[in-house]
Amino acid sequence: MGKIFYLMGKSASGKDTIYKKVKEQLPELKTIVIYTTRPIREGERDGVEYFFVDDNRLHELQEAGKVIELREYNTVHGIWKYFTADDGQFDREEHLIAIGTLESYVQLKEYFGDEKLVPVYIEVEDGLRLERALSRERQQKEPRYKELCRRFLADATDFSVDKLSKAGITRKYLNINMDKCIDEIVLSIREKM
């Protein structure tokens, strides 16, 4: 297995868009798709952004010893679970790209080792991030503003300076100008491949 370039950032930091653009510029990177039990959102496709599964499928993967890391979030809509499974996606020799949380990054780093995981932390000023999140939520058929607020506030804890430091993340890619941010990330990945 090559390196795993792991994109992460607070909600509405632009990581999904950046992830897609980086994959366009670096098509040789193979993708890792994580799993979730949350409902699919408008515009998402099963097997692309996530594998959308139910608790029964999660349990099957756990019983088979395939779950690498699992996170549960008590949302205003109930418990949503996100997890990474060793389901064959990591059996390739190519470099991989994934998107996730700081917590999942740390657990994958423990599973695969420091030398395999390369963090790509995307940061945006909180006011701009909140504007982006609100704009995105307004576009949904049924906006979930309470969940937006819960995620926004949870990010302050989940991506605290202390947690970033403990995870060994020293470089931050500022997403003020998305094109510039993408160029910096692509250049950095190319240097490490």
Image (cartoon, helix red, strand yellow):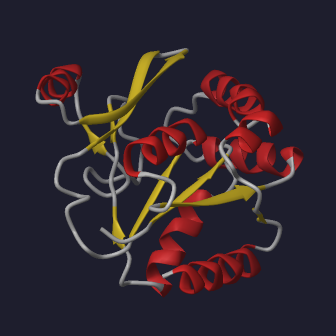
Left or right, 150 with reference to 71: right
Q: Residue at x 80, y 55 (%)?
A: 124
Residue appearing at x 80%, y 34% in the figure: 162
Q: Position of residue 56 (x, y in %)?
A: 15, 21
**Residue 136 coordinates in the image, percent (x, y):** 63, 48
Q: How many marks?
A: 0
- Residue at the image position 17 percent from the left and 55 percent from the top: 88
Nearer to me, 80 or 59: 59
Please identify the quadrant where the N terminus is shown.
bottom left
Residue 164 versus residue 94 in the image, above or below: above
Q: Is residue 176 above or below residue 10?
A: below
Left or right, 68 with respect to 55, comes to right
Q: Is residue 130 left or right of residue 40?
A: right
Q: Locate residue 155, reporting x and y percent.
A: 71, 33
Q: Position of residue 97 (x, y in %)?
A: 43, 66
Name which quarter of the figure residue 82 lies in. top left
Q: Quadrant of residue 39?
A: top left
Q: Is residue 182 above or below residue 170?
A: below
Q: Residue at x 11, y 29 (%)?
A: 64
Q: Nearer the viewer, residue 95 or 17?
A: 95
